[in-house]
Image (spheres, rainbow, N blue to C red):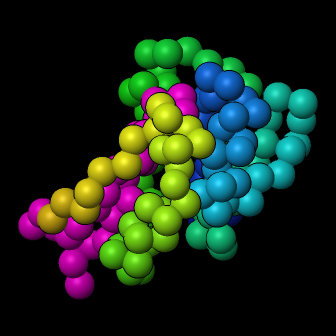
Amino acid sequence: MSEAKSLRTFLGAKDYGRSIRFYETLGFQVKSIDIKMSLVRIENASNFYLQDYYVKEWCENSMMFLEVGDLESHWKKTQSKNLTVEFPEVKISEIQHSDWGSEYFIHDPSGILWHIGKFKD
């Protein structure tokens, strides 16, 4: 596996244009690579593919984990974007603390569950 350069997952979108706007509003960079697919970049941390393809059971059972350096600041910044006003189907939780660290959750417009977290040092 020493030749591996990246690992990218594919996420579906119930309404592709709406999902693109959601991720851009959240602060991700979205680059179209095909009429039905985009590369979504999270700063320099990672990438994933967003595709114009939707299967309810698949999307609602997909989860992503994004590790951040300052969880409290990230949560406040996310809250300040008023995502649930523009995207009423989006859900954002409060921060929850566990033995391993802390996290909050975001359900995107297609039902994909994002865990935004920070591990204990």
Give the x, y percent position of residue 56: 49, 15
At 82% from the left and 28% from the top, the residue drawn is: 36
Q: Nearer the viewer, residue 92 or 42?
A: 92
Q: In this picture, is 21 found above or below 25?
A: above
Magenta range is 98-121
Q: Nearer the viewer, residue 107 or 88?
A: 88
Residue 108: tell me if it is visible: no
Horizontal side of residue 58 vs 23, given as left or right? left
Q: Nearer the viewer, residue 33 or 102?
A: 102
Q: Nearer the viewer, residue 8 or 34?
A: 34
Residue placed furthest toward the bottom: 121
At 26% from the left and 57% from the top, the residue drawn is: 94
Asked whether residue 28 is drawn in magenta, I would say no
Give the x, y percent position of residue 70: 38, 80
Q: Quadrant of residue 13?
A: top right
Give the x, y percent position of residue 75: 39, 67
Asked whether residue 117 is drawn in magenta, I would say yes
Residue 109: tell me if it is visible: yes
At 66% from the left and 73% from the top, the residue drawn is: 44
Give the x, y percent position of residue 16: 72, 30
At 54% from the left and 33% from the top, the residue drawn is: 109
Q: In this picture, is 31 found above or below 90?
A: below
Picture quarter with the N terminus: bottom right
Q: Quadrant of residue 68?
A: bottom left
Q: In this picture, is 64 found above or below 89?
A: below
